[in-house]
Image: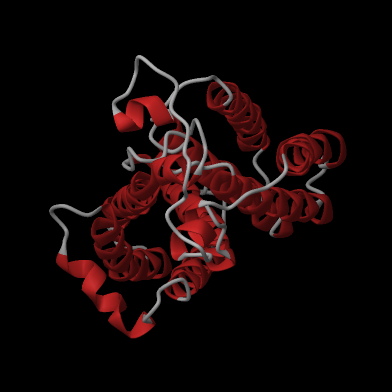
Amino acid sequence: MHPAFSVLIFTVTSGAGYGLLSWLGMGQLLGYTQTSSIDQQIILGVIAMVLVTIGLLSSTMHLASPKNAWRSFSRFRTSWLSREAVFAVLLYPVAALYAAAIFWQWSSINLLAGLSIILALVTLFSTSMIYASLRTIRQWNTPMVPALFMAYALVSGGLLFLAVSGFYGALNPQLLTVIMGLIVITLALKLVYFFWQGKPQGATIQTATGFTQASVRLLDAGHSAPTFLNREFGYQVAADQLLRLRIVMTIVAFIAPLGVVYWFTQGANVGMLSLAWLMMMAGLLIERWLFFAEARHVVRLYQGEQRT
């Protein structure tokens, strides 16, 4: 699949925003933001929603006609894209009420914190299911995709939560340990995904045509000039380049931030925590590029490939 830069920005930045809002809400419910100032909590919420907004705005750039984006709300019962749009919009008034509850210390603050967490995670899950529900792309049609989307959001949002908390001098050592553990778990899950992705399975030209008892070979691609299918679904990247990018992504998104957090954040070093978050975001952009570039749509079988 051809990686669209607007979609890369959308999934990475909005994921970090939903993750940050989730950590803020969990802090209210679990008590680890009780020592945080009201200003700190408001700033965390504002940063989260700014990231979400940047992501949602960038997603409209991927549309052929952005003015028709409102139509995505009309198929809630059958479309994960529609569900994502509805839940994303519903989050805004709930998040605004949660911010007001923080500022004025309303008695309903726990309820609003819980609703914010639920809407943030449900929206994120809906985004992931846009890809995971596609049976035509084996690399996406797996429960590991929603799990990874959730994990990326929680680690990137959690690392940003730590950086902002460190700026206010309210870094929680236990939370720091939890985030480090989540980074390790996310890395392990991604390595499992890479291993599963490389297994020889999925559709072949034999199963696609129904001729499973004999060798099938495409003689004519059916077109004499590049088409939309070639550009979007037939995107090709050299295998050695993909391998190098996988290594770079693993180091930049997980290993380097984990090392920075482990070795240099004693005493709430805000600069190092911020550096770790920026490295992770850069690494996740590479990961999302790979997510699209390594996807193989079954239509490629009719363009000459033998296996998806």
Left or right of 208 on screen, residue 60: right
Compared to 190, does 171 lie above or below? below
Is any part of residue 63 visible from this angle? yes
Q: Residue furthest front?
A: 219
Q: Quadrant of residue 136?
A: top left
Q: Which residue is pictured at 55% across the width and 67% down the height?
A: 47
Q: How many numbered circles are shown?
A: 0
Q: Residue furthest top?
A: 213
Which of these two is toward me, 295 or 130?
295
Left or right of 144 on screen, residue 288: right
Which of these two is toward me, 5 or 147?
5
Give residue 116's position: percent from left, percent from top: 34, 55
Q: Residue furthest bottom?
A: 67
Q: Quadrant of residue 176?
A: top right
Q: Residue furthest left?
A: 77
Q: Which residue is pictured at 29% across the width and 26% down the height?
A: 210
Is any part of residue 17 visible from this angle? no
Left or right of 64 on screen, residue 58: right
Q: Which residue is pictured at 47% across the width and 76% down the height?
A: 61
Which of these two is toward me, 293 or 16?
293
Give residue 303's position: percent from left, percent from top: 48, 47
Give residue 240's position: percent from left, percent from top: 78, 37
Give residue 1's position: percent from left, percent from top: 52, 51
Protein image colouring: secondary structure
